[in-house]
Image: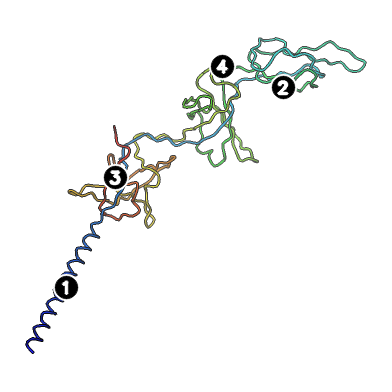
Amino acid sequence: MKKSKLILSAICGCAVIAFSGCQKDGDAKNKKEVEAVFAVNAYKAIPTTLDDYLEFGGDVDAASSVAVMPDTAGKISQVHVKIGQKVEKNQVLAAVDASRPGMVFADSPVRSPVAGTVTYFPGVVGTSVSQSSIIAKISSTNQLEIQTAVPERFISRISMNQKANLTFNAYPGEVFSAHIKEISPVLDITSRTMNIKFAIDSQDPRIKIGMYAKINLVTEHKENTIVVPYGTVISRNGEDFVFIAEKDGDKTKAVLSPVKVGIRVDNYQEILQGVTKDDLVIVKGQTLLSDGSLVNIITVTNEEK
């Protein structure tokens, strides 16, 4: 009987030790889970310049052009100029034969009313023209402009003298300046667009009439503003937040910070409140975090050099 009691006591003792060991293992496991560390990437908040803009396109044209029409109807009998040629005032551009069956007339000369450059001349010898036909256009190439159409939803962001940047495929990497010189007072009811004209600021001889320009119109300019990569901000319960990495002794924690967002430009989101200069904003891995999560920052971008 004593032997049985001893065996039972030994079994119970082992069970207690085993249970105690399991409990310690469980506590250690739970502690390990609580102290899980998440690998993240961060972005250093540095005040910068932010330009919101609209993009359009248009053809370069002369700001001043004169249409040339013949004095009489008939057929073009002579052509004396070509597109791109410079002409003087009263220079003969072409001649029109007004002869009809049974009636012969001398050729009627078509003269340029101004000095300039021939930028349009569609006719060839034998082409029939009337007194309302445009034989040619004579333009001044000293002042160039671009006309484009703006969709109705953007017209509230358009104003006189707004600055624009122009780029041309012929000159990759180079930017030319322009500004709005004219805004149409009416909209096209078919296309729901409004015409505007840009004056090209410089008289750069490389810019030719007929070239296609990509127009970047700056609609809002901001100095010393904080931005983060788009997708950094997370929304929870109708509010916007970011995670900011902060040191806590020898550890780094993710602190949930409410923010107020501004405009978005390309791949960047403006932050009006909630992030300050030099904050390390977590930009990758933040969707797995909660307030106070331990993090290990793998990379930091946007650091000042």
Q: Residues within 10 Å of mark 3 (few under 14, many from 20)?
A: few
Alpha-carbon span between mark 4 and mark 2: 23 Å
Q: At label 2, which amino acid type do we have?
A: Pro
> For numbered disc 3, what is the local secondary structure?
strand
Mark 3 or 2, nearer chain start: 2
Quadrant in which residue 59 is drawn: top right
Q: Which mark is residue 298?
A: 3
> For numbered disc 2, what is the local secondary structure?
loop
Q: Residues within 10 Å of mark 1 (few under 14, many from 20)?
A: few
Q: Nearer the viewer, residue 7 or 82?
A: 7
* Residue at (65, 41) in percent of width and height: 190
**Residue bearing mark 1:** 18
The mark lying in front, picked from 2 and 1, is 1
The mark lying in front, picked from 4 and 3, is 3
Mark 4 or 2, nearer chain start: 2
**Residue bearing mark 2:** 122
Q: Residues within 10 Å of mark 2 (few under 14, many from 20)?
A: few
Alpha-carbon span between mark 4 and mark 3: 56 Å
> For numbered disc 4, what is the local secondary structure?
strand
The mark lying in front, picked from 1 and 3, is 1
